[in-house]
Image: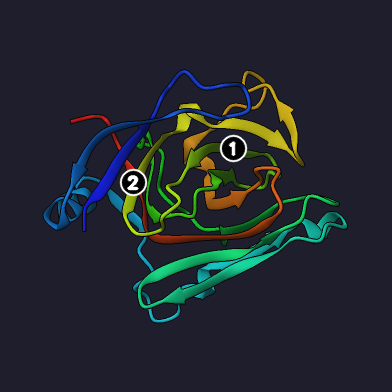
Amino acid sequence: MKTKFFTLALTCLSTGAATLALVGEADGAGKKRDKESGEILFDFTDENPGDKWITVNDNVMGGRSKGGFSFKKTKLVFSGSTNTNGGGFSSIRSKTMDLGLEGKDGLMIRFKGDGRTYNLGVRTDRSSVSYRTEFETDGDGKGWQIAKVPFESMGSSWRGMRLPKSRFPLIKDKIRSVGIMIYDKKDGPFKLQIDWIKAYSDKK
């Protein structure tokens, strides 16, 4: 099965949204090269991978969305249903840990989607500010895709309110958590399968 490979354009909006551009395809051998080209942060092969993740849905602000994570073999499955009457978001994030991202330029994620739009983001140590970029998914759920997300493309926000990155810059050596969110202002079920998340550097 082919892997569709995307990179996020650096000319993003202040919200952190960006356009996915197709840059190539790779087969199973390509998948192996992809994994070797960066540093794996999460590949869900641990004995208890769920111990590293938590769920945060809009019920923290009175919303009605439902969502969470499970594991199918060595894949993380982020699924549920969003309800825009009172919030409209569901998210999962890794627990606080030192991810060693000071010298990295961004994240990559290998996934199968459902046609909806998701966010890949990070949080820093002792801060409630989040940094995120949107990525779109194919709707057939059959082929694997890879999104490359530069840290500089991530917009900053606090409880849904946009923040200027000039005042709230992302300090990479303070990143302590990686998260996935769905907040596309749509109602209904969602499902995102994740093979791995890794960090990459453009330096050779």
| Mark 2 crowd level (few <14, some 14–19, many ≥20, 10 Å Cα) | many
Expressed as whole percent of the image width and height from the top left, the position of residue 25 reads 21, 42
Can you give x and y, in whole percent of width and height, for residue 35 in the image?
23, 53
At which x and y percent is residue 196?
A: 36, 58
Quadrant placement of the C terminus: top left
Where is residue 20? Give x, y as percent. 41, 32
Mark 1 is surrounded, within 10 Å at the Cα level, by few (under 14), some (14 to 19) or many (20 or more) other residues, namely many
Q: Residue at x 33, y 46 (%)?
A: 146
Mark 1 — residue? Answer: 131
Q: As drawn, which residue projects farthest toward the left?
A: 29
- Residue depicted at x 33% and y 37%: 6
Provide the residue designation for mark 2: 146
Secondary structure type for disc 1: strand
Question: Left of 138 or right of it: where is 120?
Answer: right
Residue in the image at 72% along x and 29% along y:
162
Nearer to us of marks 2 and 1 is: 2
Quadrant of the image occupied by residue 111: bottom left
